[in-house]
Amino acid sequence: MKLRLSLIFTPILLVLGYLLLNAYLPKYSGQFVFMVILFFADLYLWSSITKKIFSNTIWLRVLIISLYWLPLAMVIFIMVGSVLLPITQWNDPFRTIWFGIIIVFYVSKMLPVFFLLLADSLRLMSKVFHLINKGNRQNIVKENEGMSRSKFLQYMGFITGGLVMGTMFTGMFKWVYQFVVIKEKIKIDNLPSAFKGFKIVQISDMHLGSWTTPKPLVQAVEMINDMNADLIVFTGDLVNFSTKEAYRYENVLKNLKAKKGVLTILGNHDYGDYVNWTDKASKQKNMQDLYDLYDRMGWKLLRNENQIYKSEEGDLALIGVENWGANPRFPRHGDINKAMEGAENASAKVLLSHDPSHWEKIIVPSNYDIDLTLSGHTHGFQFGYESKNFKWSPAKWLYKYWAGLYNDKNSTRQLYVNRGIGSIGYPGRIGILPEITVLELV
């Protein structure tokens, strides 16, 4: 009877879930298949521990069951809650922590699922082997002596899952605000002598909707101001969903100071494309609100335009394009030709372009006269390992250029990809820490 009910209601719930997601979070409806896989993985893991859970006392049983199914209940809460109140109107710190807990629990569950699949595969292979060799009973005896390989793998899964959960919670509440300062000397052959030693501080991917408190941002602003930069540049993604996320941090960001001010560009999240707006006018107002915010803060927004700093020996041009991404799901508003108008004769050119794939797919192949491009976007996946001689992150599977300084082998063009100062999705960092970059032109 229970099996029949599950066979009837599971497809109905999956269809309803997709319809809700498509209606209220359309940008994430493409991830529904992934969510379904997570759901069945949840059921698979649950089936392996059911007997042990129901052998406990009632109160412990209820506690374990509640904790196990908590992340699924939280996902359902988001889907139903977004119908009643658009997710962009939720309290930002609450939304950030809510999403973070879901991600931590599900990632932690996937390791036991992997080891359980491995254990079940070994057990199946063992049974097939014994069926083939029915006469040989010695192997069966050995399998039952001590802890079997399948049991060992199951225990390994639960231990590693627990370690991952602890690490991810540490990444959420500690490492996400552990800012690192990375210094690079950038050689530009035709740099006018007046700009030798010119210091640019780059920050990127603030994602203010993911910050749970202004305190660490105050610390970051103080760190940046102490660097006494000639210029501060922000390479896009100020918010996650809408401009209103930035209002509570406006007075903090106003305090950023540099000799030649702050320049900024737009990232893919700044356009409000991840919101199901009621009408076109609401989306346009959101953009105008962002432009007005930058004006109030005193940050100069470059929308396919440039800022030229002059000297008797030659000019330095800072060129800013709107977002352009090789992945078609990201907006392509960047127009490098328009952005360079009036800056063609500058001795040195620095381009601000949010997505590093723009450098790879447009700037380099078309041989644009750009000495240095500054990007962000990748976050270094917010997870990985870095040492003096080695760095690795899953970001490398998505982006050829994902963190640090790169050189075009056929020219003097260079690219620097900032790891971001904020977070998105998982509101934490493990191994790849939030970055403030100090670039000195030489």
Image (tube, rainbow, N blue to C red):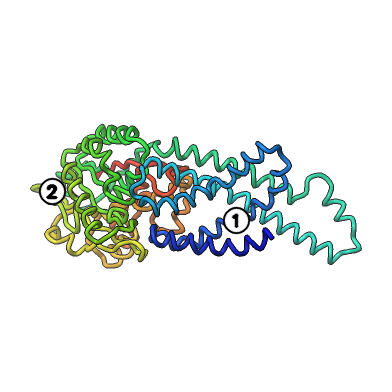
- Disc 2: which residue: 309
The tag earlier along the polypeptide, 1 or 2, is 1
Residue 322: % across, % down: 24, 58
Q: Would you say 90 lies left or right of 104 here?
A: left
Residue 407 image-quadrant placement: bottom left
Q: At x 44% / y 37%, what residue is drawn?
A: 175
- Disc 1: which residue: 41
User: Separation of disc 1 and disc 2 at Cα?
Assistant: 57 Å
Camera sees residue 442 = no
Query: Farthest residue toward the front?
Result: 1
Compared with residue 60, is residue 43 higher up or lower down, i.e. above or below?
Answer: below
* Three-letter code, disc 1: Ala
Q: What element carries label 1?
A: helix
Residue 236: % across, % down: 28, 51
Q: Nearer the viewer, mark 1 or mark 2?
A: 1
Q: At x 37% / y 47%, what residue is drawn?
A: 419
Residues tagged 1 and 2 counted as in contact (Cβ below 8 A): no
